[in-house]
Amino acid sequence: MRRLKLIGIGAGNPDYITIQAIKALEQVDVVFITDKGPNAADLVDARKDICEHYMRGKPYRSVEIPDPQRDRAPVCYEAAVTRWHEERALLYEKVFHAQLQDGECGAFLIWGDPSLYDSALRVIKRVIERGTLPLDLEVIPGITSIQALTARHRIPLNEIGETVQITTGRRLTEKLPAGGTTTVVLLDGHCAFKSLTSEDTDIYWGAYLGTPDEILLAGPLKELNEQIEQTRAGARAKKGWIMDTYILRKHESASESPPPVTMENDRGN
């Protein structure tokens, strides 16, 4: 039986990796790395650094898998993602047959946590459901970008007795939930928060969380939306990629809103 582990490695800081993840890495013979092109080389290098640091000299093989091209402007988003996942599943199955021998343990190192807005778990389940390659799958949780964001801004995720909504920029609308509901927004490549007209909403934004390039901005949305958009565009142009997320939260009065705050590269690494 081939074994496969999806190991959450946290949101950028090598110290975010858990003891459970370190113990899992010590069992791995093959590390599979999805190659998303030269602009994302930093993410490949970060995974390799984690392996070198935490696998304690254990011999292992590193196999890079070119990521299939995805339609970024589809007529039907769900159908396009389904096709992309199927292409990935077929490619992964082929690579597993060639690179992962019976009795060996392979692993994908997942940025953040495998359960939150990452496709690896869905793709691997497609491979297993095809039935041509038995796999013993284990999922190791990791620290998410949401946890890193709230920690770096020094705020709780939820308000007392209120709900938390997790959504994407594509689904964000002008109608935020009323009251103290917290909205966490991921995968917002087009700064959808700029469409919001609410005067009583604060934003807590972060990019490259947990890395030396980390950028944090917090304060009233109406005062920061242009600054965040410009900061995001500049950072992406400089590095070639960006990972960012933010929290939107309504406040009852202007006096409850935090003053605008900028923290950049203050993590000490």
Image (spheres, rainbow, N blue to C red):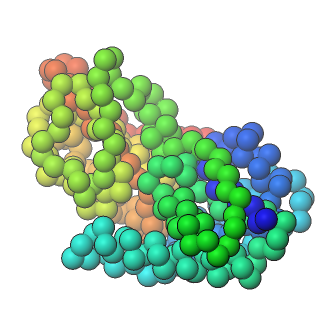
Q: Return the x and y of residue 80 as percentages of the image width and height.
A: 33, 75
Identify the image quadrant of residue 221.
Answer: top left
Q: In the picture shown, does residue 60 fall above or below 254?
A: below
Horizontally, residue 153 falls left or right of residue 76, namely right
Q: Residue at x 55, y 79 (%)?
A: 90
Quick check: can you spot residue 9? Answer: no
Q: Residue at x 80, y 46 (%)?
A: 23
Quick check: can you spot residue 90? Answer: yes
Identify the image quadrant of residue 84.
Answer: bottom left
| Residue farthest front in this picture | 131
Q: In the picture shown, does residue 4 fall above or below 148?
A: below
Horizontally, residue 50 falls left or right of residue 86, namely right
Horizontally, residue 38 falls left or right of residue 3, namely left
Q: Return the x and y of residue 215 as percentages of the image width and height.
A: 44, 48
Q: Residue at x 76, y 78 (%)?
A: 99
Q: Return the x and y of residue 48 as percentages of the image width and height.
A: 71, 64
Q: Nearer the viewer, residue 82 or 196?
A: 82
Horizontally, residue 232 falls left or right of residue 197, namely right
Identify the image quadrant of residue 191.
Answer: bottom left
Q: Return the x and y of residue 13 as percentages of the image width and height.
A: 61, 47
